[in-house]
Amino acid sequence: MTGRSRIREGGGSTRYRIRRVDLSSLSRFGCVLGAVISSVPSVLLGCGGMFVLGGMLRLLESWERAEIHLLGQRIPIDVIALLNLESILRGLRMLDNLSWALFLFLVTLACGLGGLLFLVVGDLAGWIYNLVAGITGGLEVQLTEVDRPRGRRDTGKESASPERGPR
């Protein structure tokens, strides 16, 4: 059984009760987890935004060179000027020139919003847990000591053990 932990023979189990969840650590964990989880959708959102921007720019630029064929004559029409869309076309060209900066901004914004969403939901869940645990006594967990897998060193970073208590 390489890489797996085994229950230590003769090792008893210890019961712990989780009476309270620290909201500051829950906030940090929720923010980082939300940013990591939302990173792939954020990249897709950024790519989608750049695709839409390029499509709108090509569409409006094609309207600059519109022609009407009437009685064998070609009559050029600038639909952009006719509809007073010059400022929109100028803005789209500026955003297209800043495409990588815009992409990074969209990805960063979406990751930040994902982290903020997980932070708020996690804190709300932690606050409700602390409220309910104060009334009911909290969750009880049963921990059993296990042997370390071969090849792993003791880093001394276990968060709680019956001998040392929580750090």
Image: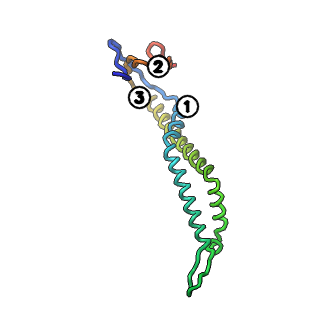
Q: Please, what is the three-letter code of the amino acid marked with disc 1?
A: Ser
Please state which of residues 56 and 109 is positioned toward the viewer in this rendering.
56
Badge 2 element:
loop
Q: Is residue 78 left or right of residue 124?
A: right
Q: Earlier in the sequence, mark 3 or mark 2?
A: 3
Secondary structure under the numbered disc 3 in the rendered image = helix
Q: Residues within 10 Å of mark 1 (few under 14, many from 20)?
A: few
Numbered disc in front, either 2 or 1: 2
Q: Which mark is residue 136?
A: 3
> Which residue is the site of mark 2?
160
Q: Residue at x 59, y 67 (%)?
A: 60
* Nearer to us in this view, 16 or 11: 11
Question: What separation in Å lies between label 3 and label 1 (alpha carbons)?
Answer: 22 Å
Q: Identify the disc placed on residue 24.
A: 1
N-terminal of the pair, mark 3 or mark 1, is 1
Disc 1, SS: helix
Residue 69, given in percent of the width and then of the height, sits at 56, 82
| Alpha-carbon span between mark 3 and mark 2 | 23 Å
| Residue 111 figure quarter | top right
CA neighbours of label 2 inside 10 A, class few (<14), some (14 to 19), many (20+): few
Write the residue at 42% across / 23% down.
17
Q: Residue at x 49, y 47 (%)?
A: 41
| Quadrant, the N terminus | top left
Looking at the picture, which amino acid does disc 2 mark? Ala
The structure residue drawn at horizontal position 65% and vertical position 73%, both measured from the top left corner, is 81
Query: Can you tell which quarter of the image residue 112 is in?
Result: top right
Sequence order check: which comes first, mark 2 or mark 1?
1
Which amino acid does the dot numbered 3 rest on?
Thr
Q: Position of residue 135 (x, y in %)?
A: 43, 29
Image height check: is 69 above or below 31?
below
